[in-house]
Structure formats: structure tokens, C-alpha cells
Image (spheres, helix red, strand yellow):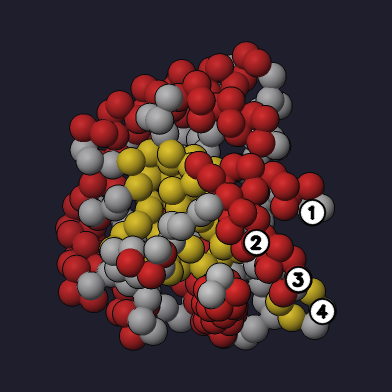
Amino acid sequence: MIEDIENGRFAVSTWSLHRALGAVYPYSPDPAKSAAPQEPYGPGSVELIDVPRQLADRGIHRLEICSFHLPSLDADYLRRLRAALDQSGVMLQTLLVEDGDPSNPDTAERDIRWIAGWIEIAAALGARNMRVIAGKQQPSDENLARASGHLSWLAERAEESGIRVVTENWFDLLPSPREMNWLLDDLSGKVGLNGDLGNWSAPEKYAGLSDIMRRAEICHAKANYIAAGMDSVDYGKCLDACRQAGYAGPYTLIYDSSFFADEWDGILLQKAFIEQFHQDEQRAAG
């Protein structure tokens, strides 16, 4: 049962707090790009190192950190952030590596080595998983095979550090269950799936999620928002797709809207919706 999951059923991604956090640090394998801080969402009001305590105060004990939210990669900062997680009783479920393209014929070798550089950071922070992009190229046989080969290499190195590599149904390489399942099959369990409820388009996404979520180890439970607020019909259908697939893992609450001035209002609304969905499901099961 999902209720018995270590540290609870819910996580929060730092992406859900991107306005509160403010600055981003766009680390990239492209040497022409700068990792200097940018403020596309304003200056922010919260430091990343304070987020674990904020989660714990709200009864949530799992966190996912986007790589671009790390203000420093220095060993001392990573130790202090790890200590903040430990002191708050918050598990770092996943470090999300937000750049790189293992499917690109021109840059895949460079990119996968750059992605591998995050293994040490993930281990220093105590992350259980490291989510990587499978690819941004079109899903040709060649591009899928290239991505699979590089992800296999990456997973072997991450395993030595106790890190589980997962990828996501995201970007052009994985537009449907066919490509997603082919990739996971070809990797023979070396790489896991972080299923994202918001990356594919309706109405096909519901059947697609029912297909792939049977293989998911973790889940980005992103809700859509319309003029009236959260699209509860769509969110319910996504959760029902997870139910049909037998998904019983944790849900990472992804709030990606400006509907609420305080991002925590959106995060906690989604948490309550999922809790109510499962309560109704349990009652219906008798």
C-alpha cells in the first residue's frame, strides 16, 4: 500500500517552488552557456537550504531538487544542504539533472559524461535517484538506440555510488508508450521510470499513462490549471490511469501555475486531492 512507503507517499519538487526560490543556475554541458544566476521568476524569498524544514513543517518528508536550483556545487555547501535534509527528516528522493541530450548524434558523448558528473553530487546529497533526460531528438531507431547505450553506461556508473538512474516520458524522443517501453525494455531494468502525468497531451495521455505507469518507480503528479482553478477532471483521470496501471509508489507534487500567489496553496491542494482520491478508492473497494 502506498501508505506504507518510507517517508510517506508525497514528495515536492523544487520546481513547484520556483517563484519562491527565485534564482536559477543553468548548468549545462554546452561550454558556450553560462551557469551565472538568472532571475526569470523574480528574486525569490526562500533559500534552498530552508526548503527541507518547510516540507517537514507541512508533514512532507520527501524532496526532489532540480539541478538548476543548487546555488553552489562546492562540497561545503552540499554538506550543509545534506545536513538540513537530515535534521528535518526529509529524504532526497531525486536529484533532477535538467540538461543534456544522450540521443543527440553530435553531442551525446559530451553530454552523457557531463550528466555522469552529477552522480557524485547526488551521492553527496544522499539522493536515492537521479532523473536524467533520455533525449530531445526525434524517436528514430538510431536515436533511441544511441540514448539507450549512453543511459546503460551511465546507470552502471551510478550504481557504484548507490544511485538509481531514472528517466521520464519527456521531450521528443519519448512521445508515446511505444518508444518509452522500447527504451525500458532495451535497458533491461538498468534505468527506472519516473512517470510524469503532465508531459503528454490529452486525450491520448490517459491510455498512455495506463500503459507506462505499471513500470514507474516514482511519479511527477503535475496538475493542469484552467481559469476556474485546478482541472480536477483531468487530474482525476490521470490518477485513475495510475490506479489502472497498479502504480503504488510515491507522488511528487508538481505545481506549475501562477493561479495561487503562494505556491504552497497549489501544492497542498494537489496533495489533498490525491488523498481524497485514494480514500474514495478504498471505500469503493469495500
Q: For marks 2 and 1, give the CA distance.
A: 14 Å
Q: Which residue is mark 3?
A: 233
In the drawing, what numbered circle is on residue 202? 1
Mark 1, Cα crowd under 10 Å, few <14 / some 14-19 / many 20+, is: few
Q: For marks 3 and 4, give the CA distance.
A: 14 Å
Which residue type does callout 4 highlight?
Ala
Q: Residue at x 59, y 21 (%)?
A: 144
- Given contact means CB atoms under 8 Å apart, are the residues at marks 2 and 1 in contact? no
SS of the residue at dot 2?
A: helix
| Outermost residue to the front | 286
Considering only order in the chain, which callout, 1 or 2, is on the residue closer to the N terminus?
Answer: 1
Res 31 visible: no
SS of the residue at dot 4?
A: loop
Considering only order in the chain, which callout, 1 or 3, is on the residue closer to the N terminus?
Answer: 1
Q: For marks 3 and 1, give the CA distance.
A: 12 Å
Is 271 situated left or right of 56 in this image? right
Mark 3, Cα crowd under 10 Å, few <14 / some 14-19 / many 20+, is: few
Q: Which residue is mark 4?
A: 227
The residue mark sitting in front, 3 or 4, is: 3
Q: Which residue is mark 2?
A: 240
